Amino acid sequence: MYSSRPTAVRTLRLRVKDKHAAWLCGLVREVNTVFNYCNELSVKVFERERRFLSGFDFWPFLKGATRGECPLHLPVQAVQEIAEEYARRRRQHRKIRLAWRKSGGARRSLGWIPFKVRTIHYRGGQVYFAGRWLSLWDSYGLGNFELRAGNFSEDSRGRWYLNVCVPRASTMADESHKPSIGSVLDRSVPSVGIDLGLKSFAAFSDDRPPIDAKRFYRDLEPALARAQRARQPKRCRAIQAKSVLDAGWSAFRTMLQYKCAHAGVWFAEVDEAFSTQTCSVCNSRAGPKGRKDLGIRGWQCPVCGAIHDRDVNAAHNILAAGHRRLAEGIRVP
Ligand SMILES: [Zn+2]
């Protein structure tokens, strides 16, 4: 697991005052227009050339969007970030096209306005974005932080938030310990992929043994047994999933994060779709699928013949996704 960002960051979430909601909703229409344009363009290029545009590839097409006769109000760094986010999501979901973002109607997409580093500025309880000062409930004292990339987002009740990345102060000094990205990518320093699952709590892409999930939900076993006796399968699943997800995974991730930061190790979470189904040797999606195959621990790839442990194979795919992310991180400043 690695981080695509050179410093460990955390995200601060601050409520934007409601008086700005209408103006932000106006910008959302522009965001959706840019996003949908990227979607359309991406499909066209794919149909013509059988390749997908990267986030960076969209930039020349979007150059004029914030200038000219009918310019967008969004800053150019926001427009670029929309394209990059589009490319990331499309790749993550492995789709040729994504769902359109809708600006109106019952199935309207919740507002989302991303921006890159050096796009917003803070002064005295307000942030400057797209030519306006927006008032916030400044619960963190933003003036003390170096503001990086982030987004404005709307919740289902129409309230707006600023989500902004800031460097973690305590880890700044550890940057010098980190190996170069190149040395990670050419495998001259070791790296490991970790798959978090229900059966194996954590499985690793190298040969260390998996961590058994039972250790993490033992405390809930009396409740689980009661639910099982009462034949409440939904309740059973809820208890299992909840305990593992809530307590185990989040604690494990937090620990990994700060331990990696202190040890000078690149760390990133990757949310890789199909990591279980994809063969880590030949990349064909031939592995176990869905709930019916949940019990399958080992399988043989029908395409290349490789024999896999389900979770170790997933960990390999996650490691590969981590390397891809790190490689992308070099290009995006
Ligand atoms: Zn295979």
Image: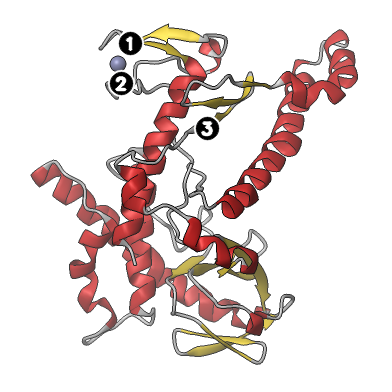
Is the distance from the Cβ of mark 3 to the nearest ligand 1 atom less than 8 Å? no
In the displayed structure, would residue 187 be above or below residue 44?
Answer: above
- Residue at coordinates 29% horizontally, 53% vertically from top-left? 39
Crowding at mark 2 (Cα within 10 Å: few <14, some 14-19, many 20+) = some
Look at label 3 and name its amino acid.
Answer: Ile
Tell me the residue that label 1 is attached to.
306
Q: Please indicate, yes or no, whether residue 99 appears anywhere in the rendered image.
A: no
Viewer-nearest residue: 330 or 245: 330
Residue that appears at 39% across and 48% down: 89
Horizontal and vertical percent for residue 264?
Answer: 53, 53
* Helix, strand or loop status at disc 2: loop
Q: Residues within 10 Å of mark 1 (few under 14, many from 20)?
A: few
| Dot 1 beta carbon under 8 Å from ligand 1 | yes
Residue 194 numbered tag: 3
Query: Is 240 placed left or right of 56 in the picture?
Result: right
Gap between marks 3 and 1 measured at Cα: 20 Å
**Residue at 57% over, 68% down:** 167
Tag 1, which secondary structure? loop
Mark 2 Cβ inside 8 Å of ligand 1: yes
The disc labelled 2 sits on which kind of residue? Val
Q: Which residue is mark 2?
A: 281
Q: Front-most of 82 and 214?
A: 214
Tell me if label 2 and label 1 are in contact, CB under 8 Å: yes
In this rendering, position of residue 130 left or right of residue 86: right
Give the number of marks. 3
Task: Measure the alpha-carbon separation of dots 2 and 1.
Answer: 7 Å
Q: Does any portion of residue 138 appear in the rendered image?
A: yes
Query: Which residue sits furthest left?
Result: 48
- Residue closer to the observer: 71 or 85: 85
